Amino acid sequence: MLAKVPDNSNLPKGIHRVWQLPDERLGTLWDSIVVDEQLKSQLVSQVALNFTLRGKVARSVAPLHGVILLVGEPGTGKTSLARGVANRAAQTFPSAAFQLLEVEPHSLTSAAMGKTQRAVTDLFSQSIGEAAERGPTIVLLDEVETLAADRSKMSMEANPVDIHRATDAVLVQLDALAERLPHLLFLATSNFPQAVDSAFTSRCDLVVTVPLPDANACSAILQDCLRGLSKTFPAIDALLRSPLLAKCAAACVGLDGRTIRKMVINAMARDPRVAVNPSLLTAEHLLAAAEAAVRTRHKKAS
Ligand SMILES: Nc1ncnc2c1ncn2[C@@H]1O[C@H](COP(=O)(O)OP(=O)(O)OP(=O)(O)O)[C@@H](O)[C@H]1O
Ligand SMILES: [Mg+2]
């Protein structure tokens, strides 16, 4: 089946992308993220339960809000997992037309000082509410600490009253939507869970920590990246059998998945000849790039 190209013209303010699900690109994205299978399965099941239970079981019995929060360091795959699990939900319930809306939090806060509360209320009650009335809707709230900032930690800089009110509006809207629209689910992500308001976290039906990849996962990510590149540059396939590959993977421990994939590209940039002919990439280039990436990470941490 051909993937439908999202129609992103005339999107309401605050929503920067809409996907009609399922979309095979999101299936590929989901498969490319290497995390514990248990974590993926828990996410898929929690999302499925949202659509199975809500609307059928009283909220006095199961007070679900339809919010799942993914937390973890940058580049660990949170946004990819959120998009991918939305796609899995659409595949789980094939008779329903699911859509995924992606919210751009900065367009609500930065451009509209003093008007954030109104913008947040409009986004939730109108744009999201109306979409969810038409059919099952999943909303990706990336960087949710921007919208639901911890009110107890606000300094008086950067228009705190406005941001305070934005958090209030998010909470009010989540309660109202949870009551009214059982076929709506929010998937939120954050690198700074300590900056998210505790009343928001308390409304989450599940909080999942996406960890940095362990040694096996680093190896799998490295291999997946090389395998993908070998589709265009077949000579790269030989690197998958290099005795040095295990050492490269071990050197990646401590890096996030995004950095590991970028490291492979940086390895190509270590030699101008490889940059114009990636088939010349060697395991030595990879090892040097992995060690350089880890040194950069340590410098940042110290
Ligand atoms: N566990 C992983 N396995 C494989 N690839 C990964 C993994 N984590 C990240 N990546 C790669 O890094 C890219 C970026 O991932 P993504 O944007 O989902 O991370 P994120 O956690 O949302 O980052 P941020 O917190 O900066 O928004 C992905 O497209 C993927 O290629
Ligand atoms: Mg992200």
Image: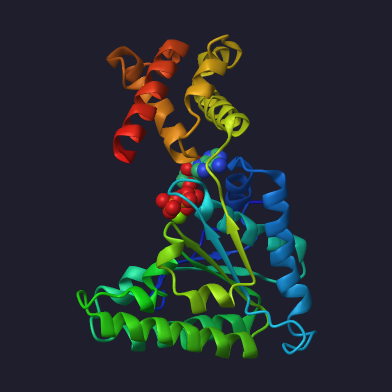
- Relative image position of residue 24 (x, y in whole percent): 62, 51
Image position, residue 235 (x, y; %): 52, 13
Question: Can you tell which quarter of the image residue 259 is in?
Answer: top left
**Along the viewing direction, whichever of 291 and 30 lies nearer the viewer:** 291
Q: What colouring style does the render use?
A: rainbow
Q: Is residue 83 above or below residue 33?
A: below
Relative to 57, say whether 103 is above or below: above
Residue toward you, 60 or 88: 60
> Residue 33's x, y, as percent?
59, 43
Q: Quadrant of residue 67?
A: bottom right
Q: Is residue 112 above or below residue 142?
A: below
Can residue 250 be seen from the camera position used here? yes
Return the residue found at the far left. 157
Looking at the image, in which quadrant does ligand 2 appear? bottom left
Q: Is residue 6 left or right of residue 12?
A: right
Q: Which residue is pictured at 42% across the width and 60% down the height? A: 192
Q: Is residue 16 visible to us here?
A: no
Q: Identify the residue at image location x=50%, y=30%.
A: 253
**Residue 27 or residue 155, whichever sits in front:** 155
User: Residue 163's spot in the image, x, y percent?
Assistant: 31, 80
- So how many labels did they put on this image? 0
Given the current orientation, which residue lies at the most extreme top position? Answer: 243
The residue shown at (36%, 35%) is: 297
In the drawing, does residue 180 fall left or right of residue 269?
Answer: right
Where's the C terminus, which quadrant?
Answer: top left
